[in-house]
């Protein structure tokens, strides 16, 4: 096997076509974060972006997108943003993960959302559920599973939708928006949400804002950005921006106007979004790893994603272990214990309120 490492901008039409063929031939890889378009757009903004191209004979058998950081530290492309990571590969490929990262010039590769079943996985790793809205049997069939599994939530959401319209006006849903204004509104809501809940604001980093703006303008056959918003009396209430393949929409940045919070606008929006997505050919909405209440209420299936690292004996790998692994294990312990997770969430929200009050 030959392995060549290039920057995404160096990929030509031949490589992009081969990447797409490998991805579409393997259902487990049907996620927009694994699409060539996503890596190429990240590469426009991230000089540390790289792609390992794996070849056997005259055939390309794999693509491994990653980022190369100082001391040989490797991370997934757009690390911290992606809900699906790994190698896009031929089904019968055989490889040694350590040989791959060595060929990439890495001493360690850390991952937290690697697709389960990857030939890239090391001997030891942790697995976590990633909830999905499975509409492969159609939107109506999906709604029936929601009614069965979360009937109280569905009835409550329908009631709140009617009340929202009685109080403010007719509900309108726009799907596949390309305008800049609703995107700016959504990003502003999301920044406010991060601050209120004590989380780090992803949109404080200009490259992430620009990446979202660039992706929002893409609408190809195999890949595109999807922005949608619900309105009452022309006032934006809730929305979402994600990316898609032909049949999978990755849930990415949902947010809503907190002035409407008592109406559960997030749930109202997600059900509306699912219906429009299904009409456009989407069969799965991947909600992403994470224990969020709305995900539990909306899911009717789940994937598995993996967390861990591949390391070679080196100083860089040792320093990485000291700085990352104990923290990751502590976080996993907290999230696995509902009581500890609730306590941590309350602490973050208290910090968020304090930070917001000091900033005002």
Image: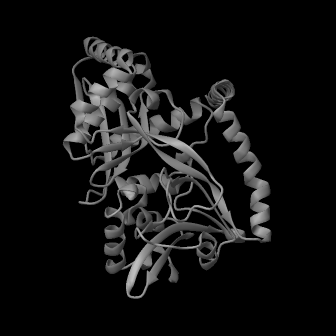
User: Which residue shows up at 52% across the image and 33% down it?
Assistant: 192
* Above or below: residue 190 compared with residue 103: above
Residue 236 seen in the current view: no
Residue 31: percent from left, percent from top: 39, 54
Residue 252: percent from left, percent from top: 43, 44
Q: Nearer the viewer, residue 135 or 213?
A: 135
Quadrant location, the C terminus: top right
User: Which residue shows up at 36% across the image and 61% down it?
Assistant: 26
Specify the color scheme.
one colour
User: Which residue shows up at 28% across the image and 44% down it?
Assistant: 283
The image quarter containing residue 121 is bottom right
* Above or below: residue 15 compared with residue 159: below
Q: Nearer the viewer, residue 260 or 288?
A: 288
Residue 350: percent from left, percent from top: 66, 24
User: Which residue shows up at 74% across the image and 46% down it?
Assistant: 327
- Taking the image as shown, residue 289 lies to the left or right of residue 26, namely right
* Above or below: residue 199 compared with residue 151: below
């Amino acid at each position: 096997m030959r392995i060549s490492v290039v920057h995404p901008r160096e990929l030509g039409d031949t490589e992009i076509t081969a990447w797409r063929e490998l991805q579409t031939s393997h259902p487990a890889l049907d996620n927009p974060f694994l699409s060539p378009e996503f890596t190429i757009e990240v590469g426009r903004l991230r000089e540390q972006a790289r792609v390992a191209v794996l070849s056997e004979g005259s055939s390309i058998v794999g693509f491994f997108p990653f980022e190369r950081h100082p001391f040989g530290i490797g991370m997934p492309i757009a690390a911290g943003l992606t809900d699906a990571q790994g190698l896009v590969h031929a089904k019968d490929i055989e490889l040694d993960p350590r040989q791959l990262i060595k060929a990439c010039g890495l001493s360690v590769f850390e991952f937290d959302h690697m697709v389960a079943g990857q030939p890239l996985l090391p001997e030891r790793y942790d697995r976590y559920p990633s909830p999905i809205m499975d509409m492969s049997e159609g939107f109506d069939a999906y709604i029936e599973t929601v009614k069965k599994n979360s009937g109280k939530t569905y009835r409550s959401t329908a009631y709140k939708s009617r009340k929202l319209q009685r109080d403010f006006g007719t509900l309108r849903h726009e799907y596949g928006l390309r305008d800049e204004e609703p995107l700016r509104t959504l990003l502003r809501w999301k920044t406010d949400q991060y601050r209120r809940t004590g989380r780090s604001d992803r949109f404080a980093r200009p490259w992430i804002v620009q990446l979202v703006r660039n992706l929002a303008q893409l609408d190809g056959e195999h890949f595109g950005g999807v922005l949608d918003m619900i309105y009452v009396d022309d006032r934006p209430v809730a929305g979402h921006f994600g990316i898609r393949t032909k049949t999978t929409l990755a849930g990415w940045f949902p947010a809503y106007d907190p002035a409407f919070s008592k109406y559960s606008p997030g749930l109202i929006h997600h059900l509306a979004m699912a219906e429009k997505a299904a009409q456009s050919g989407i069969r799965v909405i991947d909600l992403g790893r994470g224990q969020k209440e709305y995900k539990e209420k909306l899911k009717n299936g789940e994937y598995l994603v993996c967390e861990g690292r591949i390391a070679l004996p080196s100083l860089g790998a040792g320093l990485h272990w000291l700085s990352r692994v104990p923290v990751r294990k502590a976080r996993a312990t907290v999230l696995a214990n509902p009581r500890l997770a609730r306590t941590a969430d309350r602490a973050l929200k208290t910090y968020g309120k304090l930070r917001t009050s000091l900033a005002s």
